[in-house]
Amino acid sequence: MSKKTKIILAGVAVLLILATLAYIYFFSKDKNEDKTIQNYSVAEEYEELGLNQNQATDFNNSGQATRYNPNNGAIERYDEDSGEYQRIATIDKEASYTEISPDAKKVLYTTTNNPESRFSENVYLFDIDNADREYEIKDVFSPHFLPDGSLIYQSFSNNSSELKIVKDATTKTIPLPDDTEKIIEAIDSRSVIVFDFQTDLAEATAWIIDIPNQKTTQITQGEGLKVKAVIDSSCIGIQKSKGDKTSVELYNHETGKTVATIEGISLDDIDWRDDRVFYYFEKGVVYKSLFASNQAKEKIQVVEGPILQLKVLGNQKIFALSLDKLDIIDLR
């Protein structure tokens, strides 16, 4: 998840807490809308329940959701079967970001430092089976897990910009193209995408990094550039902007071919879990489309928009976050 999205989501994160408190099932009258949608609205009970606006849900590249709950100091994981958040561990710091490893054995969380010349975080890592034993790394940027459980992040130590990969008490270091902050998107345990972190529509660049061979290759650049990678998928999403128009290109990094281009949406409006299907939000509707034939889209559900983010959880549920509610669409 980009930091820009994190900042936006912080203001509406209370919506996610209400997911454990109330639900409303309704069915669309459209013949293609036979999915179940749960609608969680900002309710008057908010103040009575003492909910905190800083609560937000974070997603790893495998479609698993976690959050920090400031009401009880717990890191919690969303369970798709029960539809509830379940406690993983209690921490004594206020986390700005949380993530569970794809194998669900490790958890990381970050605390935000006061930025001076650049944005930085401290990252804390622990095994779920031994949450009392934490591993701390200071002054990092964009920490994430790789599928093999490795921790990857950008480091600015020794006045240099480097990619660090930590696994089993060993650290691999790969130089980065420049010293600006980079967002890291894991493709698999051997390769990641990095792109320039930005809060406006300035020109930015993205690279793919071959970790074993320590090879960095530029793949694209453009205004308003954002990139999304998904574990278990050979496709990456590339967002570019021109004036007030935004488009998303689904690009197969293995074949070097564009699979689909969707005009008028942002990268936060689209998600997928593998190379079979992808889901996206367009003009108030969530659609499903096949990578093999992206023109044949299927209407899944009407969702009042605009939304801030659409995320697919394990091909079973879709989170659609808007300014005043969270819609959870059950795909089963």
Image (cartoon, rainbow, N blue to C red):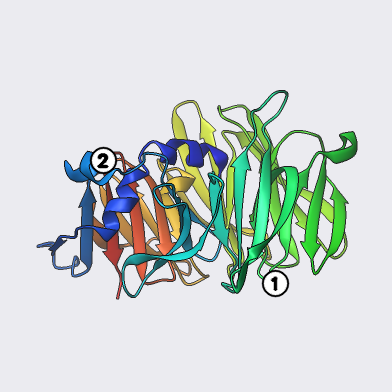
- Residue type indicated by callout 2: Asp
**Element under disc 1:** loop
Query: Residue 218 at x, y = what percent?
Result: 76, 46
Dividing the picture into quarters, in which one does residue 205 lie?
top right
Q: Find residue 65 and name its label.
A: none
Q: Which numbered disc flags the more N-terminal residue, 2 or 1?
A: 1
Q: How far from the left and from the top, in percent, is residue 107?
A: 60, 62
Q: Residue at x 49, y 36 (%)?
A: 7
For disc 2, the neighbor class at 10 Å (few under 14, some 14 to 19, many from 20) is: some
- Given the current orientation, which residue lies at the most extreme top position? 116
Outermost residue toward the left? 29
Q: Going by the image, does 2 lie left or right of 143? A: left
Quarter of the figure with residue 226: top right
Mark number, residue 148: 1
Q: Nearer the viewer, residue 265 or 120?
A: 120
Numbered tag placed on residue 324 in the rendering: 2
Q: CA distance from mark 2 to mark 1?
A: 37 Å
Which residue does the image show at 72% across and 68% down from the upper left? Answer: 189
Residue occupying image coordinates x 33% and y 66%: 84
Left or right of 204? Residue 62 is: left
